[in-house]
Image (spheres, rainbow, N blue to C red):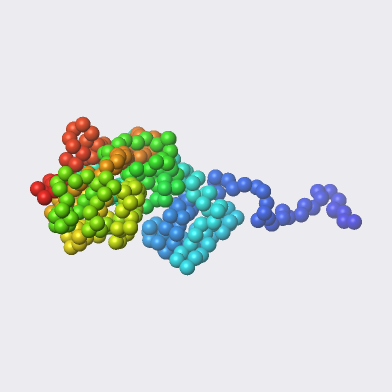
Amino acid sequence: MTHSAPGRPPARSDPAPHDADASDGLRVQDLDLNLLKTFRAVYEERHVGRAALRLGVTQPSVSYALGRLRLMFRDALFVRTGTGVEPTPRAQRLAISVDKALAILQDVLDEGSRFAPDSTQRVFRLHMSDFAASAFLPTLLAAFDRRAPGAVIETLHVDECQLNVALESGRIDFALGHFADASSHFQRTALLHERCVLLMPRRTAQRAGLPDDFVLDGTAPDTLRFVAVTSHPQSMQLLERHELMPRVRAALPDFMVVPALLRDGDYALILPETIAITFAARQPCVLYEIAGAGEWAVNAYWHRRFDADPGHRWLRALLLELFNIGEQAPFDAWLAPQPPACA
């Protein structure tokens, strides 16, 4: 049995080393804002090297920050893959909270600030469907060149299942397109109401003997061959509804090569009318109605908590000015003039 020396308090043992499995929680004062920025960069880039370039630091600095984060959260957070890194389930949950925290801090910094388009260097991040990018981006970029020459448009592709989180966190400023599952917490405005039409070179229509008032209603000359754009669901649905899938000679992921096919090929396509008019303005083509094509709204979506952000308000007003023409003019008035060859 051990006794302490007379007149002295009993000796105390040193505190036990911190147990990695202890239940004491992480405190706010333990966090460094730069660590959160590093976490978000690695999460979005899925690559340590690209995250370092984005942050303007060295790759070892990012690796060191990840090491600190792993100790703090007691999780690997990111695991190596053949192409970079992938987040763990814990990191996926953290990403939502980190985005919200950084967005709140940015809101505080932006509060009451003025926005000067002619001198700003702000980066506006937009999610666009393939159709929306083709329809809106050229006109929007031209407007930026005139009014906000230092501003940058960054288009991001966000999985639709992550769209709600991306808008709420501020990772993207706007989503342009038609997103049926968008949250009711978001504001939206219709930029235009779109429909599909049948587009083909004039020479193709002449060879098929199509009259100017032809309407695709389930019957089409056997000589017509089609190209499908698989990224556009409304177009694909109409091909199936009119039993034209057996005549599809090629399936494209986007609209990129459509102008070349119209110039050099003899194919018909079902496309959104806005895109079809744009393509037809560059070469002799014919547009035909499609029975039962229907319409859908192409919207701009944003989260209501950014309503007061000055830069956000400026871009919102610009989008409405450029594209939400509603009763002011036909929906295609902002496109290039149509050539006489387009019916």
In the image, 92 versus 271, the foreground residue is 271
Can see residue 144?
no
Placement of 241 over or under 60, stated as above or below = above
Q: Outermost residue toward the right? A: 1
Residue 228 visible? The answer is: yes
Give coordinates of residue 289: x percent, y percent: 22, 44
Residue situated in front as seen by the camera: 118 or 128: 128
Q: Residue furthest bottom?
A: 82
Where is residue 329? Give x, y as percent. 17, 35
Q: Residue at x 52, y 59 (%)?
A: 78
Judged left or right of residue 111, residue 98 is: right
**Residue drawn at point x = 85 percent, y = 53 percent:** 4
Q: Position of residue 210 (x, y in %)?
A: 17, 51
Residue 228 found in image quarter: bottom left
Q: Quadrant of the N terminus?
A: bottom right
Q: How many marks?
A: 0
Q: Position of residue 153 (x, y in %)?
A: 29, 50
Task: Work out whether residue 11 or residue 151 is closer to the camera in this orientation and state it.
Answer: 151
Q: Is residue 312 left or right of residue 77?
A: left
> From the viewer's perspective, is 297 left or right of 215?
right
Q: Residue at x 39, y 41 (%)?
A: 180
Q: Image check: 181 left or right of 202?
A: right
Closer to us: 272 or 182: 272
Residue positioned 67% across, 54% down in the render = 21
Farthest residue to the top: give it: 327
